Image (tube, grey):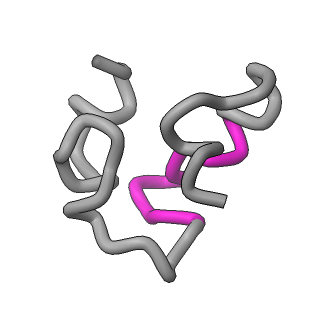
Amino acid sequence: KRAAFIAPQSESQAAAQKPVDGKRIDTETPASEAPDGSKYDIPAFLRGK
């Protein structure tokens, strides 16, 4: 499950892992565990790296 965040199998899957309206989809994963180490609700995460 966590591997999906690090290495998405497809763009569709990657999009599903991204937050919606600034809210995290996977509420079981702390924001500190985001791929870039940032919170999910910040614009930087939405932009990617």
Quadrant hosting residue 43? top left
Image point 58% across, 29% down: which residue? 7
Find the residue positioned furthest to the bottom.
28
The vertical placement of 45 against 20, above or below, is above
User: Percent x, y for residue 26?
Assistant: 56, 69
What residue do we see at 29% from left, 59% from top?
33
Location of the C terminus (image quadrant):
top left
Left or right side of 17 for 44 = left
Q: Quadrant of residue 2?
A: bottom right
Q: Position of residue 42 (x, y in %)?
A: 22, 45
Q: With 41 as the anchor, is 38 left or right in this view?
A: left
Residue at 62% x, 47% y: name it: 17
Q: Is residue 30 magenta?
A: no
Relative placement, left or right, of 34 versus 32 is right
Q: Is residue 2 placed above or below 9 in the rendered structure?
A: below
The chief SS type of the magenta part is loop
Whether 6 is drawn above or below 26: the answer is: above
Q: Is residue 23 magenta?
A: yes
Residue 3: image x %, image y %? 59, 46
Vertical order, 26 against 36 (above or below): below
Q: Is residue 30 left or right of residue 18?
A: left
The range drawn in magenta is 15-25
